[in-house]
Image (cartoon, helix red, strand yellow):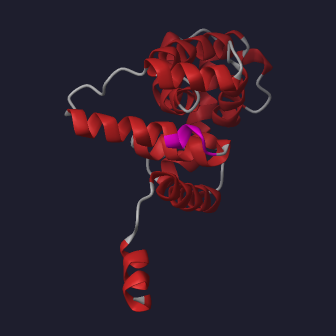
Amino acid sequence: MKATIDPTDIARQVRDARRGSQAAFAWLHRAFAPLVHAIHLGVTSRARAEELTQETFVIAFGRLAQLREPASFGPWIAMIARRNRAVSGVEERDLAEADDPAWHGAGPESAAQANEALRAIRRLPEAYRETLMLRLVEGLSGPEIANLTGLTPESVRVNLHRGMARLRDALGVITRQEERADDRTS
């Protein structure tokens, strides 16, 4: 998904999926898979995140009649994804750190940096972790994240800003602004 989705389109697709439209199920999956995948990747290995993403959609589609407000599909499936974890969060993080394979197409140094960043993101609070995963891993913009999650654009902006600051701290990244401040105090 690379464009903001109108809530009326989401509601229409949910209603069509409730009537059994395979095209509507496919549309919902295509539109919201990045959200669900980001939630799972934030706490588990890439392979397990793929499995849990599919499981989450099976659960959600099986419960689609229970969704009260069809336009709220994004926040609803996000809640299902957060609850769809086979083992505890600590065990998931341990699994994620133990079995993440190298990033395809990346050199050894880039893959090591990506894995280090992913481990650091996984240690962040949920709100920051999810928005950063959507931005940095899934490649979504702030407005797209707001649209999928049901958060306000301002909340997404705050979560991304604070999450990036925490991520920089966790990775020991010094920004140009910090370098200039250090130069002034030297």
In which quarter of the view is residue 88 placed? top right
Say above or below: 165 vs 56: below
State the residue at coordinates (76%, 16%).
Answer: 65
For the C terminus, the quadrant is bottom left
Say above or below: 115 vs 55: below
Say above or below: 148 vs 23: below
14 or 119, which lies in front?
119
In which quarter of the view is residue 100 placed? top left
Percent x, y of residue 51: 52, 12
For the N terminus, the quadrant is top left
Percent x, y of residue 39: 58, 31
State the residue at coordinates (51%, 43%).
Answer: 120
State the residue at coordinates (64%, 13%).
Answer: 61
Predominant secondary structure in magenta?
A: helix
State the residue at coordinates (45%, 57%).
Answer: 172
Residue 29 makes an appearance in the image:
no
Q: Which residues are magenta?
A: 120-124
Residue 152 makes an appearance in the image:
yes
Percent x, y of residue 139: 39, 43
70 or 85, which lies in front?
85
Percent x, y of residue 112: 32, 36
